[in-house]
Amino acid sequence: MVSNKIRANLERYFSGDDIKVAQGIVEYFNHLRTIVAPSGFDGPTYDMVCSSLLEKGIQESSFDTVFRVMISNGIVNQKRHGHYKLVKLYLTRH
């Protein structure tokens, strides 16, 4: 579950069902942060995030649209070799 502050930030870019998809993406990144990652782990790939949300019943087309908006607005940044990271602001819980 994302905090009210994070939800308010996401509502600047999304509404309706898209806000749920965006929250799912943020929750996935938060979950990965709590897992001890192996040395050299650059973050999840597009496919890792997508498959996680598809398991929750989110449509791939909805995920793709929301993920691209998150990238274009600087919420998610692409690292190297197709890996992504969430901007620290969206990982912080208040």
Image (cartoon, rainbow, N blue to C red):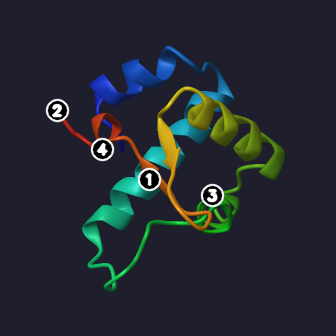
Judging from the image, what secondary structure is the residue with disc 1 in? strand
Q: Provide the residue designation for mark 4.
A: 91
Q: Provide the residue designation for mark 1.
A: 85
Residue that extends furthest to the bottom in the rendered view of this protein: 38
Crowding at label 3, few (<14), some or many (≥20) Cα neighbours within 10 Å? Answer: some
- The residue drawn where x is 30% and y is 25% is 4
Crowding at label 2, few (<14), some or many (≥20) Cα neighbours within 10 Å? Answer: few
Whole-percent x, y for residue 27 in the image: 42, 50
Q: Provide the residue designation for mark 2.
A: 94
Q: Provide the residue designation for mark 3.
A: 53
Of marks 2 and 1, which one's residue comes earlier in the chain?
1
Crowding at label 1, few (<14), some or many (≥20) Cα neighbours within 10 Å? Answer: some
From the image, state whether disc 4 or disc 1 is nearer to you.
Answer: 1
* The label number, if any, that marks residue 48 in the structure image: none
What amino acid is found at the position of numbered circle 4 in the picture?
A: Leu
- Label 4 close to label 1 by CB (< 8 Å): no
Whole-percent x, y for residue 1 in the image: 36, 44
Whole-percent x, y for residue 31 in the image: 36, 62
Q: CA distance from mark 2 to mark 4?
A: 10 Å
Q: CA distance from mark 4 to mark 1?
A: 10 Å
Of marks 2 and 3, which one's residue comes earlier in the chain?
3
